[in-house]
Amino acid sequence: MATTTPTGVRGGSRSATTSDGAPMTHPQIMKALSGLMLGMFVAILSSTIVSNALPQIISDLGGTQSSYTWVVTAALLSMTAATPLWGKLADLFSKKLLVQLSLVIYVLGSVVAGMSQNTGMLIACRVVQGIGVGGLSALAQIVMAAMISPRERGRYSGYLGAVFAVATVGGPLLGGVITDTDWLGWRWCFYVGVPFAVIALVVLQRTLKLPVVRRDVKVDWLGAFLISAAVSLLLIWVTQAGDSFDWISWQTWAMTGGAVLLGALFVLVESRASDPIIPLRLFRNTTISLASAASLFVGIAMFSGTVFFSQFFQLARNESPTMSGVLTIPMIGGLFVSSTVSGQIITRTGKWKAWLVSGGVLLAAGLGLLGTLRYDTPYWRIAVFMALTGLGLGMMMQNLVLATQNQVAPEDLGAASSVVTFFRSLGGAMGVSALGAVMAHRVTEYVKDGLAALGPKAAAMGHGGTGGGGIPDLDKLPAPIREVIESAYGHGVGDVFLYAAPFALLGLVLVLFIKEVALKSQPLAEGAATASSEG
């Protein structure tokens, strides 16, 4: 294994050095991170741009509420399963090359997704997209940690959070505008990110320069397969249970038992592997264990918000895809402000725990209040609740990764960073799957109750209009039936947030037990005699 030495630091005020040993200035760091941030923008854009277009996409492709959930879950599933592998590869190979590879995978998945003829083809393409996005999400944090000290990283993590916020709010808005534009249509939601990805590839090639440390080790492919299979089986069960089969059934026992067995085999393989994909010894560190578990619950809140708000505004309030994006600005504004401000202050003070705790309180409160949503809730209340949720997410998301990176040695940086990202993605995938299934069930029940209250004739009209679990077209329904559907979706989405709130509360409890360790003033970049510069 190559011998490594950290990049020099002068007085703790600079976090990385140039090739001649001089400290990098802020403009130099920003230039080096420009391609990375553009790549991150592409990753988040691809995840959010379809959110407001999904009702139209599923309607055009003849899908159901289950298909709606799977278009989102498929990308989250593949992103979650691939994240540990990307993290381990980052510890072994060129981080720059891996970022570029993940961008290429994303582009290929996007182009074919835009050509989808049915929901099955679209879901398969979303899997490919998710693999690329998983690489971008994991590698962004890893590359940043290789260049910048934890103390300075709070500032730049805030910038990354701002990019996240801009892409999150820009995605639904752009997706809505594209969907509402007749001469474009929803297929351009998948094509529009391709030019950004190509530009990011060029910028990365010109600006990102990192040392390459080559190690004579093998990738733990068996471990990667086992963790991917375990997660996939678990998520398939969560998505299908209650729809294709009962929660208590032989299918449930088979899938959950299989997931547990694969998970146990993964732990056995990792405990014996010479270079495991997820070093189990990392979990001996209390901070890493608690941060990973907290990230699981943060993921449930983060992804649930972006997925279900589009259904609320379009199906409970009959807004256009474009307006659905506009109406979610308070949540994204809160995320933008809190991630940027917290990053700046953490860099100045070196203290981060107060931000995590405050974020946990705001997130739990925001989700609990969103649980009161109904189709006729005044918008100003919804805006306040969304802003609280966004503020909480912005304070927790990047800082959980930061706390973890501050605890590990350079050779474990990629694995440790990807572990936190993995659990956040896993929480998001499980949350969207489970909560999507819950919402489908609750909406069906509310529709039945509402139609029954209108009488037998109206009930028959309503069932015809909503067609076997499909996404309804509100404009084609009679006014009384439309009000029933709107009420059902409003109440159903409110239930989703109410069920998500206790998980945010669990995340807060876990954060309370994390012991604050002052941020280091030295970066984790690896420079060695045997290392060559990525250029």
Image (spheres, rainbow, N blue to C red):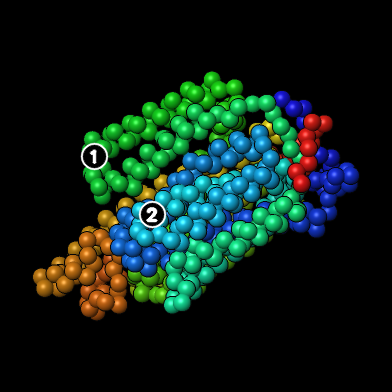
Q: Is residue 346 at least partly visible in the picture?
A: no
The residue identified by callout 2 is 121
Q: Position of residue 535 (x, y in %)?
A: 76, 46
Marks 1 & 2, CB-CB < 8 Å contact: no
- Residue at 45% in and 31% down: 226
Instruction: Single out the mark in the foreground, 1 or 2.
Output: 2
Residue 53, image quadrant: bottom left
Residue 478, image quadrant: bottom left
Is 373 placed left or right of 397 in the picture? left
Against 132, is 488 above or below? below
Identify which residue, 176 or 393, lies in the foreground: 176
- Residue at 77% in and 27% down: 3
- Most extreme residue toward the bottom is 479
Q: Position of residue 169 (x, y in %)?
A: 54, 66
Mark 1 residue crowding within 10 angstroms, few (<14) / some (14–19) / many (20+): few
Mark 2 residue type: Met
Q: CA distance from mark 1 to mark 2?
A: 30 Å
- Most extreme residue toward the left is 456
Residue 197, image quadrant: bottom right
Identify which residue, 390 or 525, lies in the foreground: 525
The residue identified by callout 1 is 248
Q: Of marks 1 and 2, which one's residue comes earlier in the chain?
A: 2
- Residue at 32% in and 36% down: 255
| SS at mark 1 in the image | loop
Mark 1 residue type: Ile
| SS at mark 2 in the image | helix
Q: Position of residue 474 (x, y in %)?
A: 30, 74
Identify which residue, 59 or 170, lies in the foreground: 59
